């Protein structure tokens, strides 16, 4: 009986050792479903399509928003006295001019808005594109605050704006007003006081005549001008008259910053790099691969424009090439000794 038990134990040990050896050998082989590192699992070919680059902003419907008027050229600004209007202007309001080489370049607040303040001193030197006057829209506008990182991207591309009111009308074209630059507080100068009337000279030998009492100013003229408040970077645009707006409603603005027609594009996964220049890996006949430098253009997040570097009939590996790591910084303990 003891001999039979020992034989059974020895058999179990031998089988366990054999199974362990087989498992060790199997673990050294790569799983059959995984390809070696660096192998291109798929490929892509360039194609052509129209491409747009846009910035999405969150805005709000606002009553009587303030926007800025900029200097059209560099020069010296000369303001004119602007009287408070009795009603909303239906024509542009001239507020001054920038003089350059003896020629005036006029500044006008557009119709439907009122002059709200001067942003610089009179006869100050200004540069082209500098905010020099503020205006206040009469009615509803859509205002979107802008992050500083987005300012340069959209500063010259305000011609095409689409708006969508949350749970409301849209999308619709939204017309930009003024500049996106941050505005300082605007000031409106006091109107010049009328000259005091002189008392008539008394007749010879007669009693002196009393001076006439000064005429009372109307309440609206006696009050100090309000000017305009300071603003941060903001985009202000107006909706078409047919669009119903509600003060405080949330809106989404899409600013088209660039367009490219019939652009040569490739998937973004096929490119190493995302701004200006990059690299792609071309798969040639026989499986040989070579890395090619390309100049990049617009991207919609799915494809990226190839401005130069490819002819359009190449086969590219996806994912794209891995850029080699740069040298470690000096003094880095992980670098070579």
Image (cartoon, grey):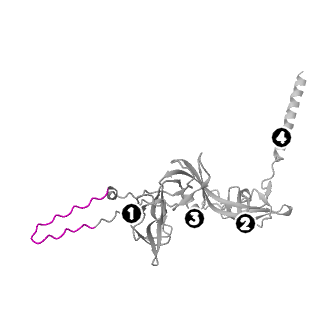
Tags 4 and 1 touching, CB below 8 Å: no
How much space separates mark 4 and mark 1, taking CA atoms? 93 Å
Residue lying farthest to the top in this orientation:
1
Which one is nearer the viewer's eye here, 297 or 206? Answer: 206
Label 1, residues with CA under 10 Å away: few <14, some 14-19, many ≥20:
few
Residue 33, position as x, y percentages in the image:
82, 47
Mark 4: give few (<14), some (14-19) or many (20+) Cα within 10 Å: few
Q: Is residue 311 left or right of residue 331?
A: right
198 in the magenta segment: yes
Using the rendered image of the protein, determine whether residue 100 is visible from the camera's viewpoint.
yes
Name the residue that disc number 4 marks: 23
Task: Check disc 1 and report the residue beneath it.
Answer: 83
Q: Is residue 87 left or right of residue 170?
A: left
Q: Which residues are magenta?
A: 195-218
Q: Nearer the viewer, mark 3 or mark 4?
A: 3
Quarter occupied by residue 98: bottom left
Residue underneath mark 3:
156
Q: Nearer the viewer, residue 41 or 315?
A: 315
Q: Quadrant of residue 278?
A: bottom right
Q: Which residue is mark 2?
A: 293
Q: Position of residue 26 (x, y in %)?
A: 84, 43
Q: Considering depth in this image, is 263 or 164 the residue closer to the camera?
A: 164
The first of marks 4 and 2 along the sequence is 4
């Amino acid at each position: 009986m003891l001999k039979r038990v020992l034989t059974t134990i020895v058999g179990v040990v031998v089988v366990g050792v054999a199974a362990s050896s087989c498992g060790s050998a199997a673990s050294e082989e790569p799983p059959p479903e995984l390809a070696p590192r660096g192998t291109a699992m798929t490929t892509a070919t360039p194609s052509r399509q129209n491409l747009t680059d846009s910035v999405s902003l969150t805005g709000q419907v606002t009553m009587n928003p303030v926007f800025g008027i900029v200097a059209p050229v560099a020069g010296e600004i000369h303001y004119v006295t602007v009287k408070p209007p009795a009603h909303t202007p239906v024509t542009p309001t001239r507020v001054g001019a920038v003089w350059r080489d003896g020629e005036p370049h006029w500044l006008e607040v557009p119709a439907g808005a009122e002059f709200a303040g001067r942003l610089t001193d009179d006869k100050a030197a200004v540069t082209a594109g500098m905010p020099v006057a503020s205006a206040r829209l009469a009615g509803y506008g859509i205002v979107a605050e802008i992050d500083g990182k987005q300012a340069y991207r959209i500063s010259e591309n305000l011609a095409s704006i689409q708006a969508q009111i949350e749970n409301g009308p849209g999308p619709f074209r939204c017309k930009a007003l003024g500049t996106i630059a941050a505005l300082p507080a605007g000031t409106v100068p006091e109107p010049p006081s009328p000259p005091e009337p002189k008392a008539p000279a008394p007749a010879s030998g007669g009693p002196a005549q009393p001076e006439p009492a000064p005429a009372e100013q109307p309440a609206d003229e006696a009050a100090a001008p309000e000017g305009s408040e300071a603003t941060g970077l903001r985009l202000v645009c107006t909706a078409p008259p047919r669009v119903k707006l509600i003060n405080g409603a949330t809106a989404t603005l899409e600013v088209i910053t660039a367009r490219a027609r019939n652009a040569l594009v490739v998937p973004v996964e096929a490119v190493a790099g995302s701004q200006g220049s990059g690299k792609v890996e071309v798969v040639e006949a026989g499986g040989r691969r070579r890395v090619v430098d390309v100049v990049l253009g617009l991207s919609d997040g799915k494809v990226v424009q190839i401005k130069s570097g490819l002819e359009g009939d190449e086969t590219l590996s996806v994912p794209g090439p891995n850029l080699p790591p740069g040298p470690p910084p000096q003094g880095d303990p992980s670098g070579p000794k």
